Amino acid sequence: MKKTTQKIKIVSILGLGTMGHGIAQVFASAGYRVRGFDDVPAVRESLHSRCRDNLKAMLAAGLIGQNSVSATLSQMDVFDSVEEAVDGAQFVLEVVREDLAMKRKLFLFLEKCVSPSAILASNTSTFPMSQIADRLKHPQRCVNMHWFNPSHIVPVVEVIPSDKTSPETLASTMELARRLGKNPVLVQKEVPGFIVNRVQAAMIREVWDLWQSGIATAEDIDIAVSGAMGFRLSAIGPLQVCDFGGLDVWSTLFKQLTPLINSGSCVPDKIQSLVDGGHFGVKSEKGIFDYTPESLEQKRIERDRHFLELTKLARNWKATVPNPA
Ligand SMILES: NC(=O)c1ccc[n+]([C@@H]2O[C@H](COP(=O)([O-])OP(=O)(O)OC[C@H]3O[C@@H](n4cnc5c(N)ncnc54)[C@H](O)[C@@H]3O)[C@@H](O)[C@H]2O)c1
């Protein structure tokens, strides 16, 4: 199994948008030859400059040395077609927009033009690989590899096999993630949303409920969740939070609180009225909060600086989850 990972030298990244450009950068930083493609020429042309900005911020944070900037950029090439981008690749990662029909079509095409020994992976946030690869002759080489935004910084990736994924494909993908300096988590059964997005959706549902019920302001909800829950979670996972808090305490809390919190499946009224009014968040400069281009840029810089500081801590952090009882 290790042999397959050692053979991976050339990686193809299809889709170089929000996620794809950072993913390409991580592979290039780890010494892989990266061949990228995006169907929008401007996105292809800006790959190097976007990665350069990321790398400069990492350099300023002391996470990489000066030489790494040019070394990383020189490992990446962009091409004008999928065929060229996947030529010679031993690992292909699809990072196009979240559209099942588009992903299925792309995988069918990849099956024809990518070497049979190469792994085909998808960064989809929601679609199980069994759906994306359902018409493929060789679904055993397909696997989901789910990264988090900003992909060049967040240390965890989820790896999700379908029931057709071969043990070799799975082992190679897990090993590859480790070689990239990521912390791969195996999701043992396909489930929509995998781990993180399911947990996040449950939390965000309650947050919207609290806000639209007028329990607290949007600012205070963000401060409370980020400064208490988020702060704690940056050091220990939620199940260990339960152990530290006391399972007797959590048992009582479940009985008393869970019947009272939101379990609905509707879009919250407040989010729908914002969306109907054309307010999509930072992309339209208005969502729950208002933004200007300057305030947004400032917020992004602060956010990424914070993430980079956490990255320094995370480099020393090993999964400290003990064996379950
Ligand atoms: N944004 C996130 O926070 C996030 C997190 C994890 C996973 N994802 C997943 O990653 C994937 C990409 O998301 P994103 O946020 O980077 O989207 P994005 O819209 O920023 O980027 C997608 C890119 O794919 C390109 N594209 C579309 N069709 C293509 C095709 N057929 N061939 C090549 N390029 C094509 C687009 O031009 C665009 O640049 C989605 O599946 C999404 O669900 C996103």
Image (tube, helix red, strand yellow):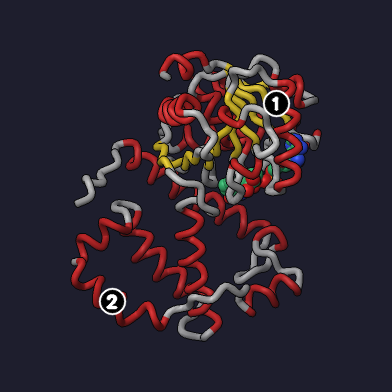
- Tell me if mark 2 has few (under 14), some (14-19) or many (20+) residues whose alpha carbon lies within 10 angstroms of its own: few
Label 2 sits on a secondary structure element that is helix
- Tell me if mark 1 has few (under 14), some (14-19) or many (20+) residues whose alpha carbon lies within 10 angstroms of its own: some
* Identity of the residue drawn at 35% across and 53% down: 234
Q: Are marks 2 and 1 in contact (CB under 8 Å)?
A: no
Q: Mark 2 or mark 1, which has the lower sequence index?
A: 1
Q: Name the spot of residue 147 as percent of width and height, x first.
A: 52, 42
Label 1 sits on a secondary structure element that is helix
Q: What residue type is labelled 2?
A: Leu
Q: Please tell me the numbered disc located at residue 238.
A: none
Q: Name the spot of residue 235 as percent of width and height, x first.
A: 30, 51
Q: Name the spot of residue 165 as percent of width and height, x first.
A: 52, 33
Decide if residue 43 is in sight here. no
Q: Please tell me the numbered disc located at residue 111.
A: 1
Residue beneath disc 2: 253
Lateral position of residue 123 relative to residue 322, left or right: right
| Front position in the image: 40 or 143 | 143
Lateral position of residue 124 relative to residue 80, left or right: left
* Identity of the residue drawn at 20% across and 61% down: 244
